[in-house]
Structure formats: structure tokens, C-alpha cells
Image (tube, rainbow, N blue to C red):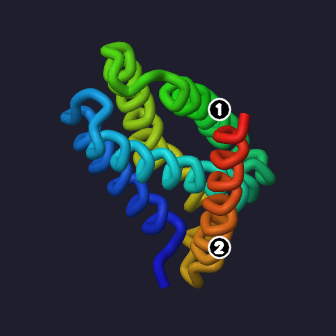
Amino acid sequence: MPTIYEKLKSDHDTHRDLLAKLVETEGNSDERRELWKSFYYDVSAHAAAEEVAFYSPLLAESDGQAEGRHSVAEHKELDDLLQELNDTDMSSPGWLTRLRTMKDRYEHHINEEEDDIFPVAKDVIGADRSGEIAAEFAERKKEERTLVDEKAEEALKD
């Protein structure tokens, strides 16, 4: 069974790939819309599940609070950028500029998680040898994906 660190890294690698493809797209193309939808839904569900399954136990321990708070604050900043991109016309030059900003901030965030937070978490909450945290993350991510879908449907109704 994979550990939480392996599951998160796998998602991060998928997100890196989607972002690399997205910055190569142009205008309001089918390709851009599909790549954005894949990225948006997966990263939104990932972040919410990560906060519950990974950051909650890290924040519960005093040795993990500084790192946990920092990352959760970055999640909020990234969520704001995601919403801004969702509200911007994809054919506008500003969309790609904003995407590049979000890409840089997101890649900084996930590199920081992998390089700085994971080692602290392994000391604070353990190596997740049984995969319990990873299993909780996977289940929560499925639930969050459903919630993201519902939120998107509500936005379309408005």
C-alpha cells in the first residue's frame, strides 16, 4: 500500500504535467478547456483532502504547526488564483499570464511540501507504513471531488 507521501507526490507529478501542457495552449480551445478542467478538479479535491488527512494530524502536534499553517495559508492563496482563473475568459491574454503566475506559485508550494514539509511530517506523524493516512486521503479526495462538482454546478446556475 502506498504511503501518504507517495500519494501526494504522485498527484503533484500529475499536476506538474497538466500545468506544463496548459501553458502551451492558446485561446479558448477545446484542449485548454479540457486540461484546465482536469487540473482544476483534481487540484481542488487534492488540496481539500490533503488538509484533512495530512495537515490535520501535522497541525495537532506542536512540532508540525509552523509548517502546517504555512502550507494551509498557501492553499488559500492558490484557491483564490484558481477561482480568478475560472472567472476569466480563457481567450484573454490575461488568462495565460495569470495561469503562469499560479503555476509558479503552485510549483513552489509542492516543491516546498516535498522537500521541507515531508521530512518534518515523517518525524512528527510518522512514515505511514500501513498506508492509513494515504487511504484516508484517497477516500476524502473522492468525496471532495463530488463536492467540487456540486460547487461547479451551483456556480453555473448563478
Mark 1 — residue? Answer: 76
Q: Is residue 58 visible?
A: no
Numbered mark located on residue 148 in the image:
none
Mark linked to residue 139: 2
Left or right of residue 42: residue 58: right
Which x, y percent locates residue 58? 70, 53
28 displayed left or right of 66: left
Q: Residue at x 38, y 37 (%)?
A: 107
The amino acid type, in three-letter code, at marker 1 is Lys
Amino acid under disc 2: Glu
Above or below, comparing residue 103 to residue 131 in the picture: above
Answer with the quarter of the image where residue 96 lies: top left
- Residue closer to the observer: 8 or 45: 45
90 over 17 or under it: above or below: above
**Mark 2 or mark 1, earlier in chain:** 1
Q: Are marks 2 and 1 in contact (CB under 8 Å)?
A: no
Q: Is residue 107 above or below residue 85?
A: below
Tell which of 68 and 127 is nearer to you: 68
Q: Where on the picture, by quarter, is residue 140? A: bottom right
Q: Residue 16, position in %: x, y?
A: 32, 46
- The residue depicted at 57 percent of the width and 79 percent of the height is 131
In the rendering, at what x and y percent does residue 8 appear? 48, 60
Of all residues, the one furthest to the front in this rendering is 157
| In the image, farthest residue toward the top | 94
In three-dimensional space, the C-alpha distance between marks 2 and 1, rounded to whole angstroms, equals 22 Å
- Residue 135 or 62: which is nearer the viewer? 135
Assign the C terminus to one quadrant of the image: top right
Secondary element under disc 1, as helix, strand or loop, is: helix
